[in-house]
Amino acid sequence: MHIAGTVIHAPSRGELEVIDDACVSVNREGVIESVTQGEAPTDALTLAPGTFLLPGLIDCHVHAPQWPQMGTAYDLPLNEWLQQCTFPMEAKYSDLDFAAASYSSLIDTLLENGTTTATYYGSIHVAATQLLADIAKEKGQRAYIGKVAMDNPDQCPDFYRDASTTAAIDGTRQLVEYIRSLGTDRVQPVITPRFIPSCTDDALAEFGRMASEYDCHVQTHCSESDWQHHYVLERHGLKDTQSLDRFGLLTDKTVLAHGVLIDDEDMTTIRSSHSGIAHCPLSNLYFSNAVFPARRALDRQLKVGLGTDIAGGASASVLDNAAMAINMSRALEEGVDATAAQVSRGVDDTRIDFRDAFWMATAGGAEVLGLNAGTFAPGNVFDAIVLDTTVAASDLRVWGDDSAEDVLQKAIYGANQNNIATVWVQGEKVKG
Ligand code: GUN
Ligand code: FE
């Protein structure tokens, strides 16, 4: 397959590359063989004027069972939100019909938005999480999926808790083995201790051993909010990164959601373990009490991608989160309290721009997951979207003298799912 048109991607952080008259050639396995410029083969699919080929968007942190609740309940702090709204919602996934309807709707919506890869938390239920994997496979989305583990009776309610530590461990094992038996590389298992408060030390230690035994991904929440950060300090006398590290849970396949409160020492720990961070700017606005220092993390060469954190964030769109990552970094740099003196209102040198945000939405997310994707480099999988700037049902308006960089910038702020004309995952068309 050959696709001819204008390519926009971010081969390295802070840098965009625009290739006019490009031809991307993809082999039968869905892997990019070459990117050439100039004359394309006659059988090439040629993109229409006003459309652009972009890497697929990567969402590094989604709570699949929270989909029905997105857009509600943002007036509570994190732990009350979990106990009063989120755990009751997730408990409903013991019902497989409900799970099937919700998960189908979620994956359809993410694909419509151009999300070619998503990293999912499931519920505590093995069967519903297996169903999530089946639906991702059937719909063709690249998906990293874990059964959420929460076995700590002190923090998890009777109605929504693993029956025992053994059940949390065995259920996790069952899910890993089930996903590995699906016979597709596109769906991968993830060991998923919800966060330290939800899990006993026995479970956390076993998950660390399992991560190395299976050599598979790990995801958890790290230093997300003041309450959570201090809970871990009190229980373990350690910060999240230190505690996770001693359990063997910081690996080069670990995705740490949020990380808002990480300091320089945490960044060093994360960098030396080659773990990645899912930056969830919309969610952080409500649940984190602070702004994630994205620029500092990127400058220290941490791996950082974006996460919608559905339903902690009220948008399913990675582009919306890219825009919010820029917005929140500006608030951090400038400060937000108008009564404070201007010189001390914000934090110097913390802003990111649309290039950084787009990088996190694509290549940065791929780096977090250890995936050969996110740019159009030969050898990468062809996970891609066509951005259509000509559709009427959108606020995205392009004018004659807009450059391709202008188009991308406008798309981050103004594109909606109508502007995502085509979506491919590993060369297979899943939208359009
Ligand atoms: N910490 C533990 N569970 C959750 C969750 O579901 N969402 C967010 N944002 N933080 C969490
Ligand atoms: Fe989360």
Image (spheres, helix red, strand yellow):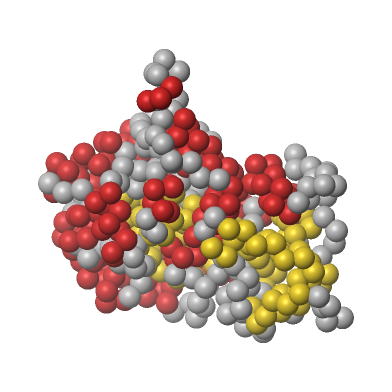
Q: Indicate left or right for 183 with 51 as reference.
A: left
Residues 228 and 327: in front is 327
Q: Indicate left or right for 249 with 4 as reference.
A: left
Q: Residue at x 85, y 62 (%)?
A: 48
Q: Residue at x 65, y 62 (%)?
A: 17
Task: Looking at this view, name the residue that lies furthest to the bottom.
Answer: 28
Q: Indicate left or right for 362 with 176 as reference.
A: right
Residues 342 and 242: in front is 342
Q: Residue at x 39, y 59 (%)?
A: 301
Q: Residue at x 87, y 81 (%)?
A: 42
* Quadrant in which the C terminus appears: bottom right
Using the rendered view, name the quadrant where residue 333 is placed. top left
Is residue 339 visible in the rendered structure shown here? yes
Residues 143 and 398: in front is 398
Residue 214 location (% of width, % of height): 31, 76
Residue 334 location (% of width, % of height): 47, 30
Is residue 102 visible in the rendered structure shown here? no
Residue 339 location (% of width, % of height): 41, 15
Residue 127 location (% of width, % of height): 42, 63
